């Protein structure tokens, strides 16, 4: 009976040792889990900051695109005005040439009188 009792005590001691080791490993794992949780929290905060910055950049890009579109419209309007002015200039030059020719003819006719 003493032998069996000693064997049982040895088994209990071994089990206590194993439980202690397991608890130690669990504690170490819990520390690692806590550290990882802190890291994840930092990453999530950083992600929020990056997301906010991304949204700000997208808003700025939208504003820039709207301004670019407005400037393109101004440029198109100016091109149209320049084209119209060029046509008008050609028409005025034609009228001026005609007027000059008529003036020369009238001057010659006046000289003949």
Image (cartoon, rainbow, N blue to C red):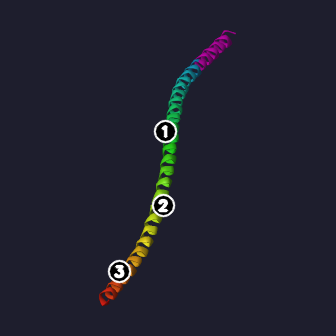
SS category of the residue bearing label 1 = helix
* Residue depicted at 34% across the width and 88% down the height: 109
Give the prevailing secondary structure in the magenta stretch.
helix
Residue 29's place in the image compared with 59, above or below, is: above
Residue holding disc 1: 53
Residues at marks 1 and 2, CA–CA distance in whole angstroms: 36 Å
Q: Quadrant of the C terminus?
A: bottom left
- Given the current orientation, which residue lies at the most extreme top position? 2
Residue holding disc 3: 100
Left or right: where does residue 75 sit relative to residue 22? Answer: left
Q: Are marks 1 and 2 in contact (CB under 8 Å)?
A: no
SS category of the residue bearing label 2 = helix
Q: Is residue 13 magenta?
A: yes
Residue holding disc 2: 77
Which region of the structure is painted magenta? 1-19
- Sort mark 3 into few (<14), some (14-19) or many (20+) by Cα contacts within 10 Å: few
Q: Quadrant of the N terminus?
A: top right
Q: Earlier in the sequence, mark 2 or mark 3?
A: 2
Q: Earlier in the sequence, mark 1 or mark 3?
A: 1
Mark on residue 2? Answer: none
Residues at marks 1 and 3, CA–CA distance in whole angstroms: 68 Å
**Comparing labels 1 and 2, the label whose residue is closer to the camera:** 2
- Given the current orientation, which residue lies at the most extreme bottom position? 112
Residue 92's place in the image compared with 105, above or below, is: above
In this rendering, the count of numbered labels is 3
Q: Earlier in the sequence, mark 1 or mark 2?
A: 1
- Sort mark 2 into few (<14), some (14-19) or many (20+) by Cα contacts within 10 Å: few
Q: Is residue 18 magenta?
A: yes
- Given the current orientation, which residue lies at the most extreme right position? 1
């Amino acid at each position: 009976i003493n032998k069996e009792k000693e064997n049982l005590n040895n088994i209990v001691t071994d089990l206590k040792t194993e439980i202690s080791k397991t608890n130690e490993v669990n504690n170490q794992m819990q520390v690692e889990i806590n550290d990882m949780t802190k890291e994840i929290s930092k990453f999530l905060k950083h992600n929020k900051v990056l997301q906010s910055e991304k949204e700000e950049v997208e808003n700025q890009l939208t504003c820039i695109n709207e301004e670019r579109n407005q400037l393109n419209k101004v440029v198109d309007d100016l091109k149209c005005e320049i084209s119209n002015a060029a046509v008008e200039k050609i028409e005025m030059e034609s009228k001026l040439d005609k007027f000059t020719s008529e003036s020369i003819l009238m001057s010659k006719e006046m000289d003949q009188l």
